Amino acid sequence: KRHRSREMALQLLYSLDSRRGLTPEQALDLFPEDEDPEVQGYVRELVVGAWESRGDIDNLIREHVTGWRPERMLAVDRAALRLAVFEGVLAKMTPVPVVISEAVELAKTFGAEDSGKFVNGVLGRIVRAACPAGGAREPENE
């Protein structure tokens, strides 16, 4: 279910990025009506969070990519990076290694030939800077 959620979130972030004036709520209305409510909820959280945080995320990308401004990247790569940085680094919803693996797979599936390598490299640099412990989450207190 989480993979499907990330796949849908990537597609919606891509739509938001390419269709100026589209709001997250309008994009979320593109859901298939029979989609699992759990998937819908997670997609909503990812899309709204990543879209609202895109300024901060794009600044992180700028800091860790030489020669590529976020606005010059492939829209699919940018969407995969925004999604992964939000989910794994900012919101800490999912362990970083899982988020990186998923983002690379999504970039390979929907992006260009080198998108997977590009996304992996950028996320690796961001994670090393933002999560010195390798992205491991702190255990929750019981």
Image (spheres, grey):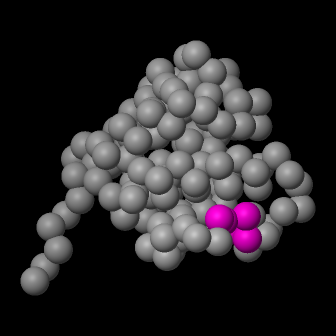
Query: Looking at the picture, how far across and down is residue 110, in whole percent?
Result: 60, 32
In the rendered image, residue 65, in percent from the top left (x then y), is placed at 57, 29
Does the segment drawn in magenta span residue 99?
A: no
Give the residue furthest to the front: 34
Find residue 26 and report its image quarter: bottom right
Q: Please, which residue is most extreme toward the bottom here? A: 142
Q: Is residue 85 above or below residue 50?
A: above
- Residue 76, picture quadrant: top right
Assign the C terminus to one quadrant of the image: bottom left
**Image mark count:** 0
Q: Residue at x 22, y 52 (%)?
A: 136
22, above or below 141, in the image: above
In the rendered view, does 36 fall on the left or right side of 48?
left
In depth, the one of 83 and 42 nearer the eye is: 42
Give the residue drawn at x 49%, y 76%.
Answer: 37
Picture quarter containing residue 78?
top right
Extreme-top residue of the structure: 113
Residue 132: tell me if it is visible: no
User: Residue pushed farthest right?
Assistant: 21
Please give the name of the residue rendered at 88% of the width and 54% of the height, measured from the top-left corner.
20
Left or right position of 104 against 62: left
Q: Residue at x 44, y 33 (%)?
A: 105
Q: Which span of residues is magenta-colored?
A: 28-32
